[in-house]
Image (cartoon, helix red, strand yellow):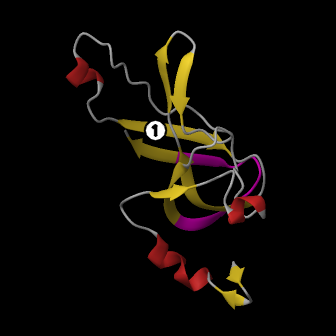
Amino acid sequence: PASHGVPLAALDRYRWGPGSEELDLDGSMQARAGAYRLLAPPVPCAELDFCAADVEAALAAREARLAFEAGEDGVLNGVAFWFELDLVDELRFGTAPGGGRRQRVQWVDPVRVAKGAPIRVAARV
């Protein structure tokens, strides 16, 4: 990638960190310019039940192993994520793309993927 003709690929190694960053898949300048693409459709990662009899156990940290199939060729350099919360009846709150709220991204070392290639992710929830 380049910005104003300056190659930035050498800086990718400094992008990774243990924490995630805010990302706007809809309204940011990069999103509007087509700089962000989802290489695979979203899949649910975890379901947390805030009304469970044992709430502490229901909300305990866990690891989810996810499998995606690349829908197109591209460079995988981050995993975007968001949440959707069912409150009551038809009332929902979330940060999914298209809802006017921002998502999060965990940057990873860039990897080229081909359409149809498997993508495996381990997520801690």
User: Which percent across, then down, holds residue 90?
Assistant: 57, 13
Instruction: State left or right for residue 22 relative to residue 75.
Output: left
Callout count:
1
Residue 26 screen position, x and y as percent: 69, 51
Q: Give the quadrant of the N terminus.
A: bottom right
Q: Which residue has dot 1 on it?
A: 65
Nearer to the camera, 97 or 6: 97
> Is residue 67 shown left or right of residue 40?
left
Of residue 122 and residue 18, the one placed in the foreground of this image is: 18
Q: Amino acid at mark 1?
A: Arg
Confirm whether the magenta stretch covers residue 77.
no
- Name the residue rendered at 56%, 58% in the picture: 78
* Residue under the point 64% across and 38% down: 99
Span of residues in magenta? 109-120
Instruction: Please name the residue shown 77% across and 57% down the image.
Output: 73
Residue 104: x %, y % from top left: 50, 51
The secondary structure making up most of the magenta span is strand
